Image (cartoon, rainbow, N blue to C red):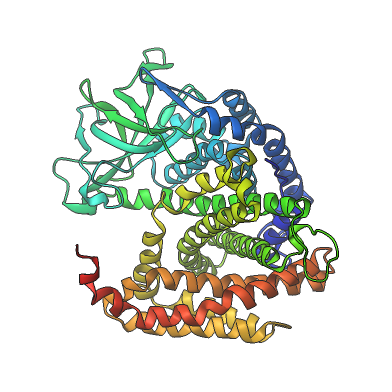
Amino acid sequence: MTYGAPLDDILFALRLAAGEGAIAAGETYGDLAGGVAEQTLTEAARFAEEVLLPLDRIGDRVGATYANGAVTTPPGWREAYAQWKDGGWNAIAAAQDFGGLDLPALLNAGCTEIWNAANMAFAVCPLLGHGAIEAMEAHAGDALKETYLRKIVSGEWTATMNLSEPGAGSDLGLMRTRAERADDGSYRLFGQKIFITYGEHDLAPNIVHLVLARLPDAPAGTRGISLFLAPKFLPDEAGAFTRRNDVRCAGIEHKLGIHGSPTCTMIYGDEGGAVAFLIGEENKGLACMFTMMNNARLSVGLQGVALAERATQMALQYAHERKQGRAPGAKETSAIIEHPDVARMLLTMASSTAAARAICYETAAAIDRAQRERDPARAAAAHERASLLTPVAKAFSTDIANETTSLAIQVFGGMGYIEETGVAQLMRDARICAIYEGTNGIQAIDLVTRKIRGGDGAALAREIEDMRTIARDAEFSQQALQDSVEALAQANEFLTKAEVADALAGATPYLRLFALARGATLLMKGAKAAAREKHPGAPRYAALARFFAENNAVAAPGLAKTVIEGGASVNESPAALNE
């Protein structure tokens, strides 16, 4: 299965999201000046293409295996992880105080895309570590940071998120894992967690589990959740981490995709309770969790971009090579890329991937500005924008991954349905992205309830005004762009006043509408910038912007109609679902 990191496209999207002049000494992204971004991404691409990509198919065929409480990763993965650690890749965006490089989230986004395109099942392990790093940086006490955070940042140890339980997946208020206070100030954990990615493995000598649990006197529901740190190994009398904690892996799941990534059932407290340490305050674990989840949601969106990019590359190569039938005006058998319907599929894939990438990188840039802006008002506005865009980045990009990998199989035809070509694996791997770290339906609900109905509307108003400006100044596809933005504005107006049930019924089509309008305008913005800079890729960027506006974004008015009028058909037709 082929893949070459699209460095030109990634760097262009990175610069566009950073903003004109921002990558320069003394500016917001001054630490990316002097070729730092280019050099880092080039090296990330080399590692991905030479080390991770050859292991991807092995991971799918062999998978992670479980025996007697231990998990063995596929052949070659331990050596690859050692190279990952030694290369310092885990430390890119972490704080310098704990061994990190403190480079921008925007740069890390580019690296995350590249690694996941080459081998998603491998890359999901450090992806979770990045979420744990952010949670600990924001909420853990100094002693925990000094003991555990440094090891996670360096990559010497890995980290997990233990959230889901049987019967309590997305509804964390139903969780039963309990924590008990110990006399020494630590805690003891008892319970079971499921779907724990890399909960057990052989890549690192210690695994640091971040676990949600409930204290005996905690308030009911999500207000009574606390976050704890429970390592696989605890320090012995000499300070070496050799003492096994009371936590074990009871088995791994047999999954549709990402076979190389062990998805574990974890048991805490078989022998008196797993030793754990509080992160943040008691009963305040939800805020700590969202620090992890927001990081992870953007990263999963980037997984979607990665798989869509790889599927597009594979389909394009095949379409150039495969000859079948005669294209219009041809006298001989044509490469299938010359057939208009195949070209339509390929353009759908390429333009949707570019739109998803643009949204994800804009989200990463907003995260950076929230942390780097010196003006408090600008920093606050950037934080609001990051919060607004995160559910869109996660849900739209992962939907695009599923759609694009499916289209790749269609381009390949019968050969795509056969495992040996590799595109079937991409489709299997992509399917989880719309489910984990909060299903895409939950992302839509979050967008509508917390960001649209629950906010003051300022961030959304700024976003729409930016879209209107781009659409008004567009040199082509102007009407399609304007129609998409005004459809979004109409849907917003409805959602702010609608009954809750009607708003929830329209949440998913609304998120898609938002993404189409935002993606189309960002592609247009990129096309204009490329033309202005005389970028070698300018003609292609213009073609993708035009196609997306005139073939994808034109669905926006229909989606607005669904949001505004479709709720009744959802909420007033329960009989259709009864047996």
Q: On the rendered structure, is 125 left or right of 503?
A: right
- Give the residue at x 50% y 45%: 428
In this figure, what is the number of numbered marks? 0
Q: Does any portion of residue 176 appear in the rendered image? A: yes
- Give the residue at x 57% y 79%: 554
- Give the residue at x 54% y 69%: 378
Examine the rendered structure and indicate whether residue 392 appears above or below residue 499. above
Q: On the rendered structure, is 123 left or right of 217?
A: right
Front residue of 338/534: it is 338
Percent from the top left, x then y, of residue 450? 36, 68
Q: Does any portion of residue 521 appear in the rendered image? A: no
**Quadrant where the image shows the N terminus:** top right
Q: On the rendered structure, is 214 left or right of 65?
A: left
Front residue of 225/562: it is 562
**Quadrant where the image shows the C terminus:** bottom left
- Give the residue at x 36% y 13%: 237
Examine the rendered structure and indicate whether residue 31 appears above or below residue 245. below
Examine the rendered structure and indicate whether residue 210 appears above or below residue 308. above
Examine the rendered structure and indicate whether residue 231 appears above or below residue 476. above
- In this view, the residue farthest toward the top is 238
Q: On the rendered structure, is 64 left or right of 227?
A: right
Q: Quadrant of residue 334?
A: bottom right
Front residue of 381/486: it is 486
Percent from the top left, x then y, of residue 401? 55, 55
Percent from the top left, x then y, of residue 87? 66, 32
Percent from the top left, x then y, of residue 389? 50, 65
